[in-house]
Amino acid sequence: MADVDQTDSIEMERRGQLVRRGSLRWVHWVVVLLSVLLTLGIWYFSKNQVVQKNQEKFDRQVDQVIGLVEERMHLYENALSSGVAFIDANGGETNYEQWLAYANSLRIDQVYPGINGIGVIYNIAPDQLESYLARERASRPNYRIHPEHDKAEYWPITYIEPAGPNAKAIGLDMAFEENRYTAVKKARDTGGAQMTGPIVLVQDAKKTPGFLLYTPFYRDGKKPETVDARQANIIGVTYAPFIMSKLMLGTLASEKRQVRVRISDKDAVLYDDNDQEIGVLNIRDMSPLFTKVVDVEMYGRIWHFDIETSQGFRNNSSIEQPFWILIGGLIMNALLLGVFILLTRANRSALNYADQMTLALKEKSQNLIKSNHDLEQFAYVASHDLKAPLNSINQVISWIEEDCDDLLPEKSKEHIDMIKNRCQRMMTLLKDLLEYSRVGRFEYSNEPVSLQKMATDIMFLHGTDQNFSCEVTDVNINIPRMPLDIVLRNLISNTIKHHDQDSGVIKVTYTEQSDGHSFRIEDDGPGIPDDLHDKALQMFQTLQPRDKVEGSGMGLAMVKKIVEHHKGTFELEKGRERGTCCIIFWPFE
């Protein structure tokens, strides 16, 4: 009684404190002041964060732009390398018809956007010129090498596809112009892909900057080890011409980026967004937020990337966010003060309402406790008292079977067997219902348990033949014995009962965790589909017709109730192709 009076006194004191808080106190003003200081701190921090975030966003877009250009150039290099492989497969030679068929198979306009074509350039010595021209004019009478020059060798464009838009380039000798000639000799000497300096393609009517990309091929289909050997064994190069603006517009879709790009090779400008039609997001910002200069090695050349943010970058960078954070924070501080005033005024009304709700909750809690007790008692009585009439029915059926065994037709005997099976199933259901109702009625203490011995005893008592085996972690643990025994017995029984084979393996794996026991009970049976896991854990639910599998449908439901009663968790592992895996976590008690 004294304890009750002391508790009531404490509750009254707490209630008095809440009542006294019905007006603004110093703590409210401290909270408002701290909130203002926090708002200023967040404003300063967000301002720096926005700058850093935008810098990182710009750097990502810079890396993306350069990465796209490099990736596209590697794609073209692969196309030329595959052309080399094609020629090597033909013994280092190809004719016009073969190259036409090969180029058509590449589907250049679809697979290699931005490329003007793909062709072959042969290295012709002066003493080979006459036979070379005779061979090519056999299929193309008008073929000629142009323009004239004073070099001691020829590098004419022999084939280029598609031929139509590149007609002016056919027969063009790379030796006539220094950028073209230097790059093709460098490709020959290095044995790798090389790019020319800025040039104007003869087939480009607009005379805009462009370049050529060469990949060499040699006799016997192998790259010689030394420069001298490469010069002696060169056959020619596969090549691709590029108009820089066409290449970049195909590679860097301006409507999808928020940075502007200018690419130059030494003093020559290859590409400039200022010279192109641009998307809405890529409008020039006269005072860009960020700029960056990057030099990239590109097949023997150095491309100079000048990249700056566009107006679209500014519009999508939330640079005014810190200002609005400050304004919003100050407004929130004002609202906070208003909330404090409203809360203090409403405090007494809230206390009265809380008193009413407390009384109602106490009444509902008492009714719920009584209902749960009545339900448990009903389940216990029903499962216990219904056994007697079932036993009597089963006994009467047995007498009928004994007395009339010779007189009954086969169909009637089947009906009698069906009645006996139904009685047995009902007995199993009542037995499981009785055990289910007892969960939580008793408290069990921890005791030493040999997990392997417990599983072995369960297998023995189950009466299964030797076709089913149980592999168990050999470990001794401290855990309530009886509840764990019921859990394992139900899971092992379920496995054997629902197995679709005459033999099987059950694995019980134990792992000790920092805060409890972890069990995995696996089998190699048919398993339970993921979408039926919830149904399988409900009472009286079976996944097969009851005529095929004897059972009450309460096994997994009982296991789940026992484990959760001991503050644990029970679940079925998902994503298994076969077999069922039950995962149990049983916390230390």
Image (spheres, grey):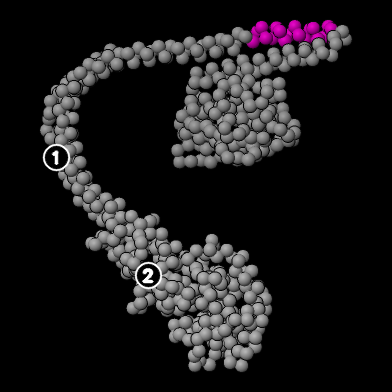
Q: Quadrant of residue 106?
A: bottom right
Residues 536 and 511: in front is: 536
Name the amino acid type tagged 2: Tyr
Give the foreground label among 1 and 2: 2
Q: Is residue 194 left or right of residue 386?
A: left
Check disc 1 and report the residue beneath it. Answer: 33
Q: Is residue 272 left or right of residue 235?
A: left
Residues 95 and 321: in front is: 95
Magenta segment, prevailing SS (helix, strand or loop): helix
Q: How many marks?
A: 2
Q: Is residue 110 left or right of residue 514?
A: right
Q: Residue at x 44, y 85 (%)?
A: 178
Check disc 2 and report the residue beneath it. Answer: 271
Q: Residue at x 58, y 16 (%)?
A: 434
Where residue 303 appears, x then y in whole percent? 39, 73
* Residue segment shown in magenta: 387-405
Residue 298, can we see it? no
Residue 151 among magenta residues: no
The quarter in which the C terminus is drawn is top left
Q: Residue at x 46, y 29 (%)?
A: 567
Q: Is residue 484 left or right of residue 422?
A: left
- Up the image or down, 356 lies above or below 513; here it is above
Residues 155 and 321: in front is: 155
Q: Farthest residue to the right: give it.
A: 406
Mark-to-mark CA distance, 1 and 2 = 56 Å
